[in-house]
Image (spheres, helix red, strand yellow):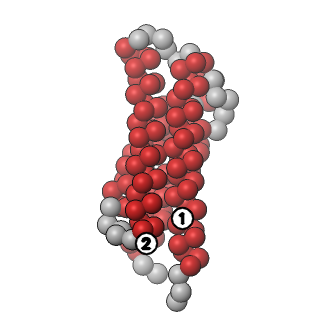
Amino acid sequence: MNLEKVIFGFFIVLAFTLNFGFFVGEIDVPHQHDVFELFAAIVVNLIATVLKFGDRTQVGAVHLATSLVADLQLIAAAFVWGYSVYVAGLGTSPGVMSSVVSLSGGALAANLVSVVLLIGETLSLRR
């Protein structure tokens, strides 16, 4: 067992599960989507992105691309949330939360692709 691969897989799956945890719930109900869970998803996704920089294979390039997409979507969701609450003064209205959760859904799709790639890559390895 390679410790580097364990850590790599751990952060990919953790990023997916945190993103999924934030995404689940009614799309326009603010109390079902915690800001700290979004923050944790962003931090773990950024860590996963850094871990993906070392792989020089084609699969590694797709891993990095999916991670960058997830990072962009989650950061955009945090920006929309922060802007609406602290700049525009709209608070967490149903429309704002719908936008935030939709953006995190895009990140969830990118993280799902990354997990599927990880599973496919693992299954194709020979001993």
List the residue tagged with mark 1. Answer: 117
Crowding around mark 1 (Cα neighbors within 10 Å: few <14, some 14 to 19, many 20+) is some
With respect to residue 127, does 51 lie above or below? above
Residue 116 at what x, y percent from top left? 58, 62
The residue under the point 41% across, 44% down is 71
Q: CA distance from mark 2 to mark 1?
A: 14 Å
Q: Residue furthest bottom?
A: 127
User: Does dot 2 land on a helix, a strand or a loop?
Assistant: helix
> In terms of sequence position, does the residue under pointer 2 or pointer 1 come before the other?
2
How crowded is the residue under tag 2: few (<14 C-alpha within 10 Å), some, or many (20+)? Answer: few
Q: Residue at x 53, y 20 (%)?
A: 96
The residue sitting at 41% across, 23% down in the picture is 82
Res 83 visible? yes
Q: Nearer the viewer, mark 2 or mark 1?
A: 1
The amino acid marked with disc number 1 is Leu
Q: Is residue 116 above or below residue 78?
A: below
**Residue drawn at (46%, 32%) of the image:** 77
Q: Which residue is mark 2?
A: 5
Residue 39 shown left or right of residue 18 in the figure = left
Labels 2 & 1 near each other (Cβ < 8 A): no
Label ID, residue 31? none
Q: Is residue 33 above or below residue 111?
A: above
For the view shown, which residue lies furthest in the top direction? 89
Percent position (x, y) of residue 12? 48, 58
The type of residue carrying mark 2 is Lys
Image-quadrant location for residue 53: bottom left
Residue 1 horizontal side relative to residue 51, left or right: right
